[in-house]
Image (tube, helix red, strand yellow):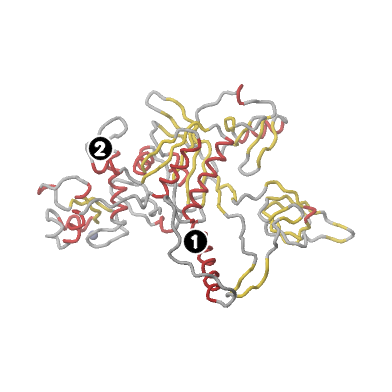
Amino acid sequence: MSVLVVDRHQKPLMPCSEKRARLLLQRRRAVVHRVEPFCIRLKDREQESSALQPVALKLDPGSQTTGLALVRVQARETGEGHHALVLTHLEHRGEEVKKHLATRRGYRRRRRSANLRYRAPRFLNRRRLPGWLPPSLWSRIGNVLTWARRFMRWVPVTRIEVEEVRFDMQLLQDADITGSAYQRGTLYGWETRAYLLEKDQRRCVYCGATACPFEIDHVLPRSRGGSDRISNLVLSCHACNSAKSNQTATEFGHPEVEQQAKAPLKDAAAVNATRHAVVEHLRRLGVPVGTWSGGRTRWNRERFGVEKDHALDAVCVGEMADVQSPPMRTLQITAQGRGRYSRTQVKGGFPVGYLLRQKRVKGIQTGDLVLAEVPEVARGKKLSTHGRHRGRVAVRATGSFRVGSVDGINAKYCRVLQRADGYGIGLLEASEPPPSHPSKRNASFLPMAQSQGYPEAEV
Ligand SMILES: [Zn+2]
């Protein structure tokens, strides 16, 4: 990935290559501004006197992983060319948040029933504010906003492109929409497929088959006056589709499919709730925000032959004439939280230990990135931990820390490289497959689409 660059007043400049960054550091024209993600500060440059190109921050919000990409936008005769600068996977901790809350709820429940002190019963006296979302969803939104803000501090972002909806409802309902924005005939099909996969939950509506190539079946066949309206379309396997031939779904022995087809379109609002909230908040960051549909992302990916990957998906969000994404290492950011409020370690419902009340020991906090340089001999004693150790630290009140996997390092040998901020950061090699959810692996295929199926429902 490119190295992030800021000027002497910490204002963002264009990212540079790793090689260039190395030279700038060697010639002492730059200093390290931040270790993870790697950012340098040019000592002799100011933003006002530098040439900046338009940079777009692109986001593909997902329930487990959000893809973020920074691309340089170049004008072409046919439109815009997007050149990837930084690719990022942002791993959320939604499930963990949920688990912690369930644990807390359990403790509170016990305290109410235990004979400790009187607590007035509480029920039906809480009201949720409008726009309330569960904390696990808020954590996802918070992660996205945090990193959007951070990248805007280090890169001169001129606009944000975000995949807001999985499919364009307007385009689905009124298939006659035309205009420069909608390339009907090509994009329309992608929206339809994205929607049908979601609606029929990736299974044949007739036999329930899941792991097979899907076809689009007309409930009332075209040959008998059936339309291409989305409500007349369902997902079907090849065998069922050809067996059904020119019968209606009822004649084929599936009246429930016909019944459902008559019902109004499923409300996609629930699926898109978090995505709307993300966009709402991104709009407050002070740069123009463009919103796009997931069908278009799929279409772009197919058109430019881009691999299926969270960060590369983000690169394909929006309207563009071409995409360049040279092989590069992807930044892997994992949300880890900032520790717990609870100070008691519990095992099987019993306290087995207590955590420190204060977070810092000798100025170092659990989660800080440290470099420990342990000498061979100290006070005439040989040290078994001798050597250089770099990694996240776990602190103890005694001042004997664990760095990475090495335990028993004295605090005085540790130097903080970067403070803990609730995120773990690493780099994925270019050849490494993206760590995606196992259930996404056996995604379904559509006859016309060689790409992998759509991600899981993102709620
Ligand atoms: Zn079938």
Question: Residue drawn 77% across and 55% down?
Answer: 411
Classify residue 12 as left or right of residue 193: right
Which x, y percent locates residue 261? 20, 54
Which x, y percent locates residue 362? 77, 54
In the image, ligand 1 is in what quadrant? bottom left
Categorize mark 2 by other alpha carbons within 10 Å: few (<14), some (14-19), many (20+). few
- Looking at this rendering, what residue extends furthest in the bottom direction? 115
SS at badge 1: helix
Indicate the amino acid at tag 2: Gly
Kindly indicate the quadrant of the structure image that contains residue 307: top left
Q: Is residue 377 above or below residue 163?
A: below
Q: Is residue 152 above or below residue 62?
A: above
- Looking at this rendering, what residue extends furthest in the right direction? 380
Q: Quadrant of the N terminus?
A: top right
- Sequence-wise, the earlier of marks 2 and 1 is 1
Near-viewer residue (220 or 209): 220
Disc on res. 98:
1
Q: Which residue is mark 2?
A: 185
Question: Residue drawn 23% across and 51% down?
Answer: 264
